[in-house]
Amino acid sequence: MNEISQPSVTLTLANANQTVQNTAQRVLVVGQQTAAATSTSGALVENVGDDFDTLFGARSQIAGMVRAYKKVNPVVKIDAIPLDDNGSGVPRVVDFTLTGTATAAGTVTLVLGSELDHSIVVPVASGDTAATVAAAITAAAALDTKAPFTVGNVSAAVTVTAANDGTVANDLGVELVVDVAGITISVDIVQTTAGSTDPTLTSVFDVVPSTRRYQGVIWPYAATTVVAAFLSPRFNPTNDVLDGVAIVTIQDTASAAQTTLDALNDQNLVVFVDEQITEDTAGATTQYLGPAQNEASYVKSALFAGIRALRLTEDQVITNFLTSSASLDQFGGPALASLPYFNTPMAYLPLVKAGRGFTRQEIEDILTSGGAVMGVNVAGNGSLVGEVPTTFKTDSAGNPDVTWKFLNYVDTASQVREYFFNNLRARFAQSRLTEGAASRGRDMANAPIIGAYLDKLYLDLAGPDFVLVQDGETAIKYFKDNRTVTIDLAAGKATITALIPIVTQLRTIIATLKVSFSTDA
């Protein structure tokens, strides 16, 4: 075949110069499993599915955390490091004793760590003895196979035992409400044994791949040294983006919580605080030991971590977790990093009952110390998140520093950094470096080219898809005037410095309204 095809024409298709989006969210949870677990203690379980009750034991701390996380966020991957109880561990034990005989029908309610999920309501008939009621409570509690406690009784003496050994269960709420004429609490609800001796945590993160990033870590232990040591070197690593934030919940008095928080100074650590409540007045029909908001501390952490990860995930519907009605904010993505976390609805948390919880002044004091509080809205009919600071308060020299004061600041800066990182790496993946002019049609970079690309990325981040940095002529000029690019040809290195004016949150409104008796000028 003598085919002649002239002139020879070749058209090559090249990739479009599209920007690279930030990496998907990923969350890690650490906690104890029970003897019923099928997972190996200390191993990294990746992408935990819906079989977590089998993997970790349905009553376990870690199953409770995963269950709460998946309630609000079935989308973002969650990995887990399950731990067996320490061989020397002791479980928490709470006891109470009933007495008398019912003279009318009624109910007895026992709450085991969660007012919404683990409330055991036992009907009582007239004529039932205290021993009969205690046996009924035990039988009903056995049917709740996911509660973090087991319940037993001898005659009318009831024993509530934590499913896991160690200190974490000491924060769980145990509440008894006796609404039966003739039945009384003869031995008040009391913690007879405090949970003690947690698993060894020193090397728990050794199983995490060095390049695996977790933007959120759910940590159930009040001791935060280990998780802080894991996250600290990941905040500013070389040639990578690995930063993340640990979410922890503790409960104590306001003053004791402040003492704990004042000793912390870490932008990688968010600590929620709830008030420790003891209501065991002799003869009272309602007795309680636990947090003001009767939900497990680790569940609160898991719920918040799940909502945060969903907010930062592209195109996920987050309407149920917003007070804002702005149309574009109803869908997750990097832009939500700059939207305040305060006033986030927490539908899966119970209300704080009247007489329980911190005062407004105590909440302000806790905030000053670097702690966050979940509570109720002004109407008293819904649970909300308050302001969410990190525990960061001072720079390395001990000077007051607000750079990382709030989680929104950390999340905003993290999204900005990652966007610059990913796109600089992609744009200049195979470029020559020169201090002179670049030749047209050749992949070359010099200070003006790199600077122009930085300007382009800044404009992206200021636009409606991100709203992470300030927009407008003044802000853009500020960025351009304060960025520098220095070239070192021998080292093949471009050194960039820049000031990034981020978007923050509206936290306070102060207005003066002056009364006038005339509308005349």
Image (cartoon, grey):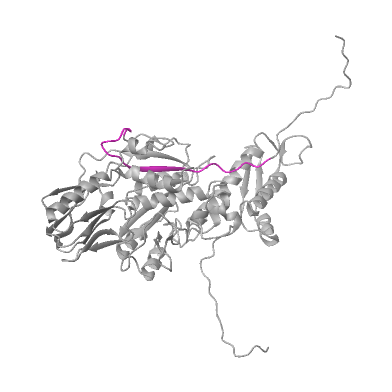
Q: Which residue appears farthest toward the top when viewing the image? A: 1
Q: Can you see residue 349?
A: yes
Q: Residue at x 19, y 66 (%)?
A: 284
Q: Is residue 156 magenta?
A: no
Q: Residue at x 32, y 68 (%)?
A: 354
Q: Is residue 340 above or below residue 243?
A: below
Spot occupied by residue 504 in the image (x, y as percentages of width and height):
55, 60
Q: Is residue 99 above or below residue 424?
A: below
Spot occupied by residue 214 in the image (x, y as percentages of width and height):
46, 42
Q: Is residue 338 above or below residue 230?
A: below
Q: Which residue occupies the foreground of this view, 434 or 237?
A: 237
Spot occupied by residue 476 in the image (x, y as percentages of width and height):
68, 57
**Residues shaded magenta:** 18-40
Work out which quarter of the rendered image holds the N terminus and state it. Answer: top right
Main secondary structure type of the part rendered in magenta = loop
Q: Which residue occupies the foreground of this view, 117 or 357?
A: 117
Q: Is residue 346 left or right of residue 473?
A: left
Q: Residue at x 64, y 54 (%)?
A: 464
Spot occupied by residue 157 in the image (x, y as percentages of width and height):
13, 53
Work out which quarter of the rendered image holds the C terminus and state it. Answer: bottom right
Residue 164 image-quadrant placement: top left
Q: Is residue 429 left or right of residue 60?
A: right
Q: Which residue occupies the foreground of this view, 241 or 316?
A: 316
Q: Which residue occupies the foreground of this view, 367 or 113?
A: 113
